[in-house]
Image (cartoon, rainbow, N blue to C red):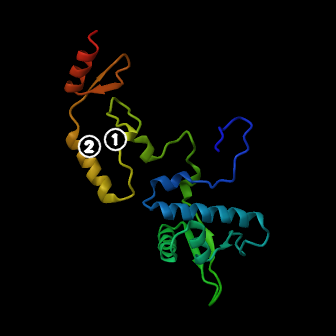
Amino acid sequence: MTEFLTVDTNLPPYLVFPRFLLDMELNETTKLLYMILLDRARLSLRNEGWTDASGHVFLYFTIEAMSNVLQKSQMTIKTSLAALESKGLILRKRQGAGHPNQIYVKFPKDAFRETDRILSPRQTENCPYDRQDSFPETDRKLSGNKKERKKNDLSKRESQEDRSPYGNFQNVFLSAKELENVRQTVPN
């Protein structure tokens, strides 16, 4: 049975999703793996002795264990780790044969500048300004695939007619056909 969130609700354990991941070209498994590594790094931070001589926090997490946690194949985990490493979000230090790597979780330098009040570049495209057109979220197909996004952007531009602002605040954008439909439906 589910329950509603109230003022007195104690939240169940959850993972933090860093906002900067929204703008990164990573698949969902890789983003989820980063969240799990970040959570494990937070636990390492609480435990004494899980820092190196430079004071950087590290963790041990075998590929097999990551595979079990995410219920993904070991090859998928290796691919995701390589993607995180190529983006500079983790650093793996080899410890020798038979020993798991030390994993250092990193983040972009500007990651702390973003707050709830500051939207990421991808989020600001949903906010119309200077009488620009806006598209409802339901009209967008969310995808991590560059080809699909480019195809969707082209189809939107092709299907989009010239729209003019209407309403008291000039914040409703309608094509001539849409305006005529509204006038027929609502005569006054």
Tell me what residue is drawn at x 65 percent, y 44 percent. 1
* Dot 1: element: helix
* Residue 145 image offset from top left, x and y in percent: 35, 59
Tell me what residue is drawn at x 62 percent, y 74 percent. 65
Tell me what residue is drawn at x 41 percent, y 36 percent. 127
Left or right of 16, for residue 167:
left
Query: What is the quadrant of residue 156 in the picture?
Result: top left
Compared to residue 113, the image places residue 95 above or below, namely below
Extreme-front residue of the structure: 1
Extreme-bottom residue of the structure: 97
Extreme-right residue of the structure: 48
Extreme-top residue of the structure: 188
Q: Are marks 1 and 2 in contact (CB under 8 Å)?
A: yes
Where does label 1 land, which residue? Answer: 139
Left or right of 92, for residue 50:
right
Q: Please give the label number shown on residue 156.
A: 2
* Residue 180 image offset from top left, x and y in percent: 21, 20
Quadrant position of the C terminus in the picture: top left
Compared to residue 103, the image places residue 27 above or below, namely above
Q: Nearer the viewer, residue 121 or 160?
A: 160
* Dot 2: element: helix
In this rendering, which labeled residue sits more in front, label 1 or label 2?
Answer: 1
Left or right of 88, for residue 130:
left
